[in-house]
């Protein structure tokens, strides 16, 4: 593009220069050449800015392209002939290619760090984080009975002990949340880096397919192990309290016998968890050892006397068999203990006595309508215990799978020697298509016609257009494609590209005007253009952060260049030696704090340009250095000029971010929140359909499409959640006019959204057991009877979906909510009539059947989901208000007229 633009500029100069013109006229300023180069610069800056906004993965190549076209078109109007233009472009291209070649060679030969090494380093950190999370979960379970049970339903203890227990409980919760968030972050990084590891040519042990399997196995561990951490959130929900019931029942439930029985059960649970967590910790270490990610201990310590001499150690190939046996022992022991405990409490069904009381009723007497409160409490506790056991059992099986994989790779010789590994052709093609075309806009349903009479819902089809019916002929179909052009031109990416182009040209115009062209070149204002091109951001808060960060780091770069130059008295050898140390210093912080990458690179670039220019002048002389029109300045003048130009560029970028209409973090956050609520409504509907499908049939084409759609929605939600959290952090940098932003309310909504996503993911994950149960002809009888007994859950799911859609529309448009919005409290997985019939299908004797524990898991997750949705509705109501024209009289003198016969306050509504 630079070659084409400069060639067009040279031709414009030739066509507008009169024959026989003097050398000063022929090679001096030419308005036509300047206009042509300005047009090409505007077009290229606009295109690359739009591309960077659409494809963030192209950010670094986009910066290189931006710098190249800026330098090329700034100096383009000065080139009078094609030969000089080609010389400039060739030198510019050689400089870029030389830098890239040097960086490539250094990356390959000097302490090389491959994408595979990054992936396996993250995988090591992931498995080590799993070990830490399991231990944190065990510590939380140890304090759970004391903090929740005795704090809510037991007799109050002394003030010091109570505060101590509460402090320990809160400390365990905080540790659990921190490790869980860190594990999820590592999982997200693994998902981003796995494609680079798979497409790399390298020498190693594991092939591309093995890396794909490892990533899948790690992903399978993520859901159950992080899902187990949700017990901290569930314990605080009023309908899922582990340690107590409502105030009217506290005296009965808090009796010594009841508390002792619960404590005894929980102590048994804790002992079982300690045993299995210990073996899981060793299993993760075993996996790290076999995959070569951790050193193999040489049995330095003597064998554990309690474990016995024949117990396998981490690193032994028969450790997987030992782990599988311990998992089965854990399941068998826990099932026996649960059945014994349930018999003592008079429970014979996993869902007995809780069908009609998913949430605490207002009147305590309603609870006792033929159902003792102790049995209600026992059933709730049973659900929680089954919930915890199932997720820990699932985590154990997921870890067993990766242990088996590691042992297989050792036994088949994969880990015995290193080999040259090439990426598969399909992998490279898929990645290239993903970068060029992006992801598919929706699930592929082209071959669904062969399924017969299956009717697909609207969400399987392309989104409907309220202004256009589907095309019925080729002309209308062609018109739909044409309408995509104005839709694209009105997108956020194009608006961002326009802002960057205007900001760039507000300074670059000086280069294309006769009176300011020489000043622009002499004072190196192209540096300001570079800072605009690489540092401009779409939102005002981020713009303030970038402006202050780039200016501050440039100041440090200027100070660093002074130290680099004067500490050795300007001696060339000393300057070069210290120059390397300073670059190491800059890029250490760039790698340590990637959030400040652009700012730190701006400071390093300042240091490089200042020192490099002074050394260049020493080599080529002042006359050649000033041949392009740049003035020569000693270092003590050049460095402040550099700081001023960078600060000016950052300030101009900020001005065009907030002018004429600022795009604030608050508006982007509100938009993302509305989209996330609508996406959550779709996710709930998809998960409900997935569970119903897995209950009713085995694997089918519709099942696979539902699973694909569910995974896609989950990935979109994760991106939205990260975006909202990032915008929350930048809100502190955003200049505010008027009242404060309700940051705490948005934070609460985002937290509840994350909880909803966690619960839905657990429901979807656990329901896979139903499909596994159906594959077993001997164990699927109870599941078939249970599936046939359930009432259709679509209408309840649709009510929650409708509620979330209303919340989404209100947040996006800023409209008040309709009155009396609440999530349905009867959103249940089981049929009330089926539970009341005391059917043997739900008898605890089936607790060892595949998928039986999942019923309790889904019950707990659904109740927590409904409670969370109600909290979201309350928070959204706090943000946008509610349609309410009722007239309330609060005058004390009129109090008697506003009280009815029962002593309750009345309202007058009009």
Image: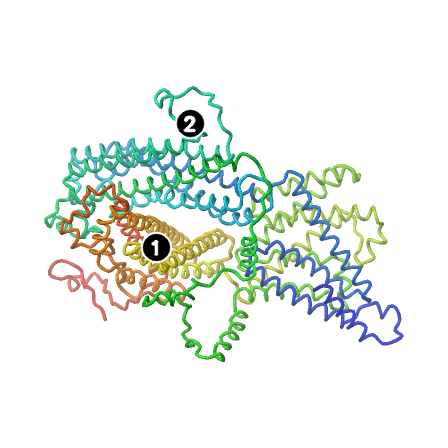
Name the spot of residue 18 as percent of width and height, x first: 85, 76
> Would residue 49 appear left or right of 755 to someone viewing this image?
right
Closer to the eye: label 2 or 1? 1
State whether residue 295 is above or below residue 654: above
Q: Nearer the viewer, residue 387 or 409?
A: 409
For the N terminus, the image quarter is bottom right
Count how many numbered circles sit on residues in the image: 2
For the C terminus, the image quarter is bottom left
Name the colouring of the figure.
rainbow
State whether residue 283 is above or below residue 437: above
Task: Say which residue label 1 marks.
Answer: 699
Q: Which numbered disc flags the more N-terminal residue, 2 or 1? A: 2
Which residue is located at x 22 percent, y 32 percent?
264
Which type of secondary structure does the marked residue at label 2 adopt? Answer: loop
Q: Nearer the viewer, residue 148 or 347?
A: 347
Q: Nearer the viewer, residue 845 or 628?
A: 845
Name the spot of residue 336 as percent of width and height, x first: 22, 35
> Would residue 544 appear left or right of 260 to someone viewing this image?
right
Q: CA distance from mark 2 to mark 1?
A: 39 Å
Task: Say which residue label 2 marks.
Answer: 313
Name the spot of residue 754 as percent of width and height, x first: 38, 51
Residue 801, located in which quarter of the rendered image?
A: bottom left
State whether residue 282 is above or below residue 227: above
> Would residue 371 appear left or right of 88 to someone viewing this image?
left
Q: Are marks 2 and 1 in contact (CB under 8 Å)?
A: no
Which residue is located at x 15 percent, y 38 percent?
343
Residue 246, located in which quarter of the rendered image?
A: top left
> Badge 2, how many Cα within 10 Å: few under 14, some, many 20+?
some
Can residue 167 be seen from the camera position used here?
no
Which type of secondary structure does the marked residue at label 1 adopt? Answer: loop
């Amino acid at each position: 593009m630079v070659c084409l633009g400069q060639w067009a500029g040279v031709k414009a100069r030739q066509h507008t220069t009169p024959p026989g013109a003097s050398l000063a006229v022929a090679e001096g300023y030419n308005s036509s050449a300047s206009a042509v180069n300005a047009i090409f610069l505007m077009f290229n800056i606009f295109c690359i800015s739009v591309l960077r906004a659409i494809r963030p993965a192209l950010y670094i190549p986009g910066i290189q392209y931006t710098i190249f076209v800026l330098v090329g078109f700034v100096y383009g109007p000065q080139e009078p002939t094609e030969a000089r233009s080609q010389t400039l472009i060739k030198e510019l291209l050689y400089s870029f290619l030389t830098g890239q070649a040097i960086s490539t060679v250094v990356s390959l030969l000097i302490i090389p760090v491959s994408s595979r090494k990054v992936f396996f380093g993250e995988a090591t950190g992931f498995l080590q984080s799993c070990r830490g999370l399991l231990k944190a979960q065990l510590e939380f379970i140890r304090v759970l009975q004391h903090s929740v049970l005795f704090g809510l339903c037991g007799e109050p203890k002394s003030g010091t002990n109570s505060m101590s227990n509460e402090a320990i409980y809160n400390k365990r919760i905080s540790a659990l949340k921190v490790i869980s968030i860190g594990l999820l972050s590592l999982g997200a990084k693994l998902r981003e880096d796995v494609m680079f590891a798979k497409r790399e040519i390298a020498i190693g042990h594991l092939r591309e397919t093995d890396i794909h399997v490892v990533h899948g196995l790690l992903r399978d561990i993520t859901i159950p192990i992080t899902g187990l951490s949700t017990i901290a959130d569930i314990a605080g929900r009023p309908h899922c309290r582990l340690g107590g019931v409502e105030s009217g029942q506290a005296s009965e439930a808090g009796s010594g016998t009841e508390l002792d029985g619960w404590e005894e059960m929980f102590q048994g649970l804790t002992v079982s968890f300690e045993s299995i967590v210990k073996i899981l910790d060793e299993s993760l270490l075993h996996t790290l050892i076999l995959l070569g990610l951790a050193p193999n201990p040489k049995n330095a310590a003597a064998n554990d006397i309690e474990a016995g001499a024949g117990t396998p150690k981490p690193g032994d190939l028969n450790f997987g068999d030992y782990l599988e046996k311990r998992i089965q022992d854990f399941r068998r022991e826990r099932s026996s203990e649960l059945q014994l405990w349930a018999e003592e409490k008079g429970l014979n069904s996993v869902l007995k006595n809780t069908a009609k009381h998913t949430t605490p009723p207002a009147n305590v007497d309603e609870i006792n309508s033929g159902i003792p409160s102790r049995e209600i409490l026992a059933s709730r506790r049973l659900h929680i215990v089954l919930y915890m056991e199932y997720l820990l059992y699932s985590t154990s099986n997921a870890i067993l799978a990766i242990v088996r994989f590691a042992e297989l790779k050792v036994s088949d010789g994969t880990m015995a020697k290193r080999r040259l590994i090439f990426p598969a052709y399909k992998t490279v093609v898929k990645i290239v298509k993903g970068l060029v075309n992006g992801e598919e806009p929706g699930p592929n349903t082209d071959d669904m016609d062969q399924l017969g009479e299956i009717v697909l819902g609207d969400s399987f089809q392309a989104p409907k257009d309220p202004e256009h019916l589907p095309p019925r002929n080729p002309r209308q179909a062609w018109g739909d494609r044409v309408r995509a052009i104005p839709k694209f031109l009105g997108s956020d990416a194009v608006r961002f590209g326009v802002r960057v182009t205007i900001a760039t040209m507000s300074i670059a115009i000086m280069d294309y005007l006769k009176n300011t062209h020489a000043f622009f070149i002499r004072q190196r204002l192209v540096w300001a253009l570079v800072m605009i091109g690489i540092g401009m951001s779409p939102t005002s808060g981020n713009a303030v952060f970038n402006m202050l960060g780039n200016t501050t780091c440039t100041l440090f770069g200027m100070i660093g260049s002074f130290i680099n130059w004067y500490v050795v008295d300007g001696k060339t050898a000393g300057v070069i030696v210290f120059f390397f140390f300073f670059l190491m210093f800059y890029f250490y912080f760039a790698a340590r704090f990637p959030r400040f990458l652009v700012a730190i690179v701006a400071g390093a670039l300042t240091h490089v340009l200042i020192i490099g220019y002074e050394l260049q002048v020493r080599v080529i002389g002042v006359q050649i250095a000033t041949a392009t029109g740049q003035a020569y300045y000693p270092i003590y003048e050049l460095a402040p000029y550099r700081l001023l130009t960078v600060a000016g560029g950052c300030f101009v970028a900020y001005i065009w971010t907030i002018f004429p209409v600022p795009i604030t973090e608050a508006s982007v956050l509100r938009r993302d929140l509305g989209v996330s609520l609508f996406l959550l409504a779709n996710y709930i509907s998809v998960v409900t359909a997935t569970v119903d499908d897995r209950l009713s049939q085995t694997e089918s084409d519709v099942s696979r499409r539902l699973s694909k759609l569910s995974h896609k929605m989950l990935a979109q939600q994760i991106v939205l959640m990260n975006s909202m959290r990032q915008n929350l952090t930048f809100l502190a940098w955003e200049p505010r006019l008027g009242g404060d932003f309700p940051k705490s309310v948005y934070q609460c909504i985002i937290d509840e959204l994350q909880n909803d996503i966690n619960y839905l993911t657990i429901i979807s994950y656990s329901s896979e057991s139903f499909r596994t149960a159906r594959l077993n002809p001997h164990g699927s009888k109870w599941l078939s009877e249970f599936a046939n007994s359930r009432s259709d859950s679509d209408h309840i799911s649709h009510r929650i979906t409708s509620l979330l859609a209303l919340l989404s529309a209100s947040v996006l448009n800023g409209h008040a909510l309709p009155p009396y919005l609440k999530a349905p409290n009867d959103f249940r997985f089981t049929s009330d009539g089926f539970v009341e019939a005391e059917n043997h299908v739900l008898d605890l004797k089936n607790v060892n059947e595949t998928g039986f524990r999942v019923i309790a898991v889904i019950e707990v997750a659904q109740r927590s989901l409904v409670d969370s949705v109600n909290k979201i509705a309350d928070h959204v109501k706090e943000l946008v208000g509610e349609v309410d024209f009722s007239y309330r009289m609060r005058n004390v003198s009129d109090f008697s007229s506003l009280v009815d016969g029962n002593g309750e306050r009345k309202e007058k509504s009009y």
